Amino acid sequence: MLHGFKTAVIKKACINSIKNPHFWIIVILILSISFLYYFSFRVKLTDPEWNVLWRLIVFEYNNHLNGILFYLPFIYVAVIFSLKGLLITWIFTLIIALPRIYVMSYSTAGFILNILFLLIPLLIVIIFAILTQWRRVDKQVFRERERERRTYIAQILTAQEDERKRIAREIHDDTTQRLWIVADRVQKLARKKSGEISEEISDELVSINQTILGISNDAKRLSLDLRPSVLDDLGLAQAIEWLVENIDQSIDAQLVVNGTEQKLDNLSEIMVFRFVQEALNNIRKHASATQVIVDLNYDDEKIKISISDNGTGFKLEKDISQLALRSQLGLLGLQERARMLGGTLDIQSEVGKGTCIGLEFKIPSISSKDLRNDFKH
């Protein structure tokens, strides 16, 4: 059965080769060169019209290079059919050229040397094929390592988000609730009749109550920073709108949404949310901007996000990874999240003219969503 399968494969390969126009070009080229070499024995080389052919024969004879015109089909085959095609062509042309090499060689050493010269293109292509294969293997190994690295990073990010969600829920549902209970009890104590507690103590209790409420609000804000419930409850667009509304009171920020919102898998939504959050935080901390516009564009296959500000801008390095040397890791984080989404990051900035950060990625297919959800759980 295996023998029959191999025979069928070889037969199919032969049929495909015959149908290939390059195959016939090579055949015609080899036959033409063969005719030229063997036809030269039947002409008078002293005639002026055969001067070029005579010089070729003398040149090949003196330098043990009989059959060097076959280098032409060798090169052509190497480019079109690679190593296997070259090997077959080399054997075929060697059989054709062997009688001429034998006749034109004046010694055994000259005969062997001529054969070795014909081996040169074959050896070059073999070396080139080996180097190409090594490079292909290296690239494959690099892609596998890159895929493993991204998978590992996705695991870390997923674990971080799960932990953020758990801590945020505990702060919101436990810590803030307890603080409210304590604040309520302190408030009740402060409202007791003047005969039961002194006015000084009552004022102190009111102050304590305000402090507890302040701590409760800070805890609530911390909980939202860790994991805003709007992302789980209402979706990505509303979560980004929440980020825009809470960036800073001194910044006029607005969100523009185009197209019909599409539901992404959990990991992709988190990646996009953190991308926008990181970009807005960078603007708030470093840009000295007074205006920010976030564009969120949906279409059937892609999502495009651009975040523009009118801040101070900066000189952008050609290689973003160089920013790590100056401990400017914000843009590196954006680049990594863009890679995790399988998208592209575009940053345009000029000193004094603001910055525009763009993200574009394909909406994950159903299989990708299922894979990421399975991976998450």
Image (cartoon, helix red, strand yellow):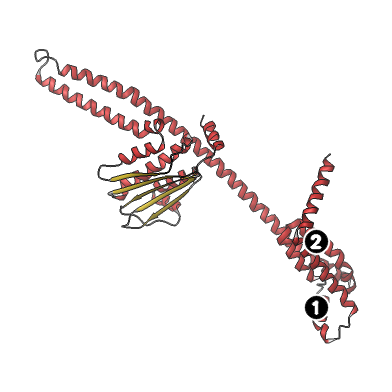
Marks 1 and 2: which is nearer the front? Answer: 2
Q: Is residue 275 left or right of residue 353?
A: right
Amino acid at circle 1 = Leu
Q: CB atoms at circles 1 and 2 under 8 Å apart?
A: no
Amino acid at circle 2 = Thr
Q: Is residue 317 left or right of residue 90?
A: left
Q: Residue at x 81, y 43 (%)?
A: 5
Q: Kindly indicate the quadrant of the structure image that contains residue 259.
A: top left
SS under mark 2: helix
Label 1 packing within 10 angstroms: few (<14), some (14-19), many (20+): some
The label shown at residue 238 is none
How far, Cα to Cα, is label 1 from label 2? 23 Å
**Residue 271 at what x, y percent from top left?**
44, 39
Label 2 packing within 10 angstroms: few (<14), some (14-19), many (20+): many
SS under mark 1: helix
Answer above or below: position of 348 versus 241.
Answer: below
179, 347: nearer the viewer: 347
The label shown at residue 89 is 2
**Visible residue check, residue 28:** yes
Q: Which residue position is annotated with label 1?
A: 56
Q: Earlier in the sequence, mark 1 or mark 2?
A: 1
**Residue 129 at what x, y percent from top left?**
70, 56
